[in-house]
Image: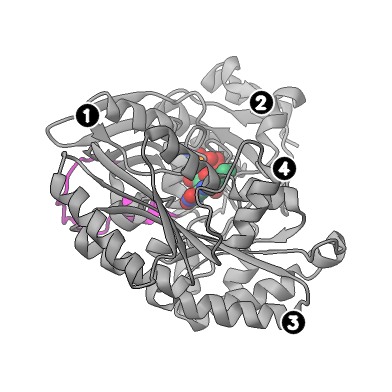
């Protein structure tokens, strides 16, 4: 519980309006999107400027008040909620720092405050004929600070990279209260350690991001969206390779889902229908796009479709004839999480392996899971183009949900050990948060984890900044 004296002092520094103490107003900030975690705190600060943020953090540092930074609260690993562990953190939200500060058309970059949403970045870029290429289902709520802190991915990573690849520079308030001024739009800057890179993916443990500058790309003018029926993940991976070549590297998304997943969607999500009459074991949703009208691209794509169908690599396919049909295809992909939720209990994994190992990973891991957890329904889907699978396992049909969820730890160990065996990662895009910190401790190389701890200790000696994430023990 934060004392009355602290509340008065922080109100004097930031103004009364920047303090939220009412349980009703705190409530939406204390529940995770899936309803999996519920946080606790009696105070949220909402600074409006970097200087206010620095004043707030300096005060917290001086009085050893622990902090959890929060953006859109769409994170899925319990990293944006206070009070989940041994600490009584306060929340610092960036909800009052939402401005787009400018688009530099010549440099193709955009600068915005930390609380600005991804959708607002996309909108501002589009107004200048440009595109902010990060695209994820939470884009209406997730923020500049959140995507940087989690190094968010999404469906376009294959072509445009993760948030790390898009971030040119950033400004942040460090755990000491000092302001790090790395808000440079430079593509080249070799002047020693790059603190911006350290803050990307740090999940709010090394500072609070207050502003950032991102790369933009030319808007996609010509776009082809295809729904393809395929025999296996191996076919999907081969198709990806040939599509990249024949389109001249213009594949901007390449997603996969199994037939069981499509069935869940058709059963649970109103108004959905399969794009094809053919049923197949797996489906691919791919998008091929470029920034000019290019008739050669269309011709190449059509002959690629004919050749691959003749060769039996594609069993059937639909090319969206309109934007509305393309949106219907994407709706299926984006409904996958919701459909799984409605189908019953599921144990979720966000793993990545090299693209060339995806097929073997899926087949070997599925066999192991089905042998060890009879009746479980393995339903992996996601960003095959960059090696990231949401390797979700559904409870047996009509089985006992609680009994199935009780296998969470065993099952997760199996899936994560498999990811590591295939040279992959136990967290491809959602981060570690508080959810996976024990798994990080179990699976990460000791030297790597020790170095991370030393970095944390150097920048945050009193462990005030998001102390309950990443590390199982106090850094
Ligand atoms: C429907 C749905 C779909 C999703 N799809 C994807 C996807 O495709 N790819 C993907 O990568 N993720 C996805 N996510 C996860 C989530 O949207 C991302 O992790 C996103 O980057 C979180 O942004 P946020 O602003 O909501 O951050 P929050 O949830 O508020 O915080 C996430 C983490 O960042 C820290 N943080 C927040 N703001 C700051 C700041 N200013 N400075 C320092 N640290 C900060 C928090 O402390 C926390 O550790 C999805 C989530 C949902 C609900």
Going from N to C along the chain, the mark reached first, 2 or 1, is: 2
Please report the residue visible at 49 percent of the width from the left and 71 percent of the height from the top.
231
Lower sequence index among marks 3 and 2: 2
Query: Label 4: few (<14), some or many (≥20) within 10 Å?
Result: some
- Pair 2/4: label in front: 4
Q: Secondary structure at mark 2?
A: helix
Q: For the residues marked 3 and 4, what is the alpha-carbon distance in whole angstroms?
A: 34 Å
Q: Is residue 295 above or below residue 159?
A: above
Q: Nearer the viewer, mark 3 or mark 2?
A: 3
Residue drawn at the location 28% of the way across and 36% of the way down? 131
Within-10-Å neighbours for mark 3: few <14, some 14–19, many 20+:
few
Position of residue 326 relative to residue 454, above or below, is: above
Residue found at x 50% / y 52%:
276
Q: Which residue is mark 1?
A: 129
Asked whether 184 or 272 is in front, the reply is: 272
Q: Earlier in the sequence, mark 2 or mark 4?
A: 2
Q: Residue 372: give its label.
A: 3
Crowding around mark 1 (Cα neighbors within 10 Å: few <14, some 14 to 19, many 20+) is some
């Amino acid at each position: 519980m934060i004392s009355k004296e602290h509340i008065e002092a922080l109100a004097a520094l930031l103004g009364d309006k920047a303090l939220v103490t009412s349980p009703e107003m705190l409530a939406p900030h204390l529940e995770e999107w899936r309803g999996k975690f519920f946080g606790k705190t009696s105070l949220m600060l909402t600074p409006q400027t970097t200087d206010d943020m620095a004043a707030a953090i300096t005060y917290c540092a001086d009085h050893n008040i622990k902090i959890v930074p929060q953006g859109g609260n769409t994170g899925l690993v319990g990293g944006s909620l206070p009070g989940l562990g041994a600490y009584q953190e306060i929340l610092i939200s960036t909800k009052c720092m939402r401005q787009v500060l400018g688009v530099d058309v010549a440099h193709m970059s955009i600068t915005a405050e930390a609380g600005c949403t991804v959708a607002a970045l996309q909108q501002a870029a589009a107004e200048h004929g440009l595109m902010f290429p990060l695209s994820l289902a939470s884009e209406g709520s997730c923020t500049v600070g959140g995507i940087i802190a989690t190094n968010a991915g999404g469906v376009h990573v294959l072509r445009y990279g993760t948030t790390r690849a898009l971030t040119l520079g950033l400004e942040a308030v460090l755990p000491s209260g000092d302001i790090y001024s790395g808000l440079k739009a430079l593509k080249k800057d070799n002047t020693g350690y790059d603190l911006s890179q350290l803050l990307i993916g740090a999940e709010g443990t090394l500072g609070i991001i207050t502003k950032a500058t991102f790369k933009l790309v030319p808007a996609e003018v010509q776009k082809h969206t295809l729904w393809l029926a395929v025999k296996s993940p191996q076919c999907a991976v081969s198709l990806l390779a040939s599509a990249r070549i024949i389109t001249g590297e213009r594949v901007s998304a390449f997603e996969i889902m199994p037939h069981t997943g499509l069935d869940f969607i058709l059963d649970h999500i109103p108004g959905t229908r399969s794009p094809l009459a053919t049923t197949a074991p797996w489906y691919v949703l791919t998008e091929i796009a470029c920034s000019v009208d290019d008739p050669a691209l269309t011709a190449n794509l059509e002959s690629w479709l004919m050749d691959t169908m003749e060769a039996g690599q594609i069993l059937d396919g639909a090319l969206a004839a309109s934007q509305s049909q393309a949106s219907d295809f994407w709706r299926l992909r984006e409904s996958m999480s919701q459909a799984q939720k409605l189908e019953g209990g599921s144990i979720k994994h966000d793993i990545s392996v090299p693209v060339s190992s995806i097929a073997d990973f899926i087949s070997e891991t599925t066999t192991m899971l089905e042998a060890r957890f009879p009746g479980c329904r393995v339903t992996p889907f996601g960003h095959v183009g960059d090696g990231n699978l949401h390797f979700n396992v559904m409870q047996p049909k009509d089985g006992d949900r609680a009994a199935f969820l009780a296998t969470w730890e065993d099952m997760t160990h199996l899936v994560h050990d498999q990811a590591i065996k295939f040279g992959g990662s136990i967290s491809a895009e959602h981060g570690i948060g508080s959810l996976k910190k024990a798994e990080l401790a179990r699976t990460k190389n000791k030297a790597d984890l020790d170095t991370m701890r030393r970095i944390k200790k150097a920048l945050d000696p009193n462990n005030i900044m998001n102390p309950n994430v990443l590390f199982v023990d106090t850094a």
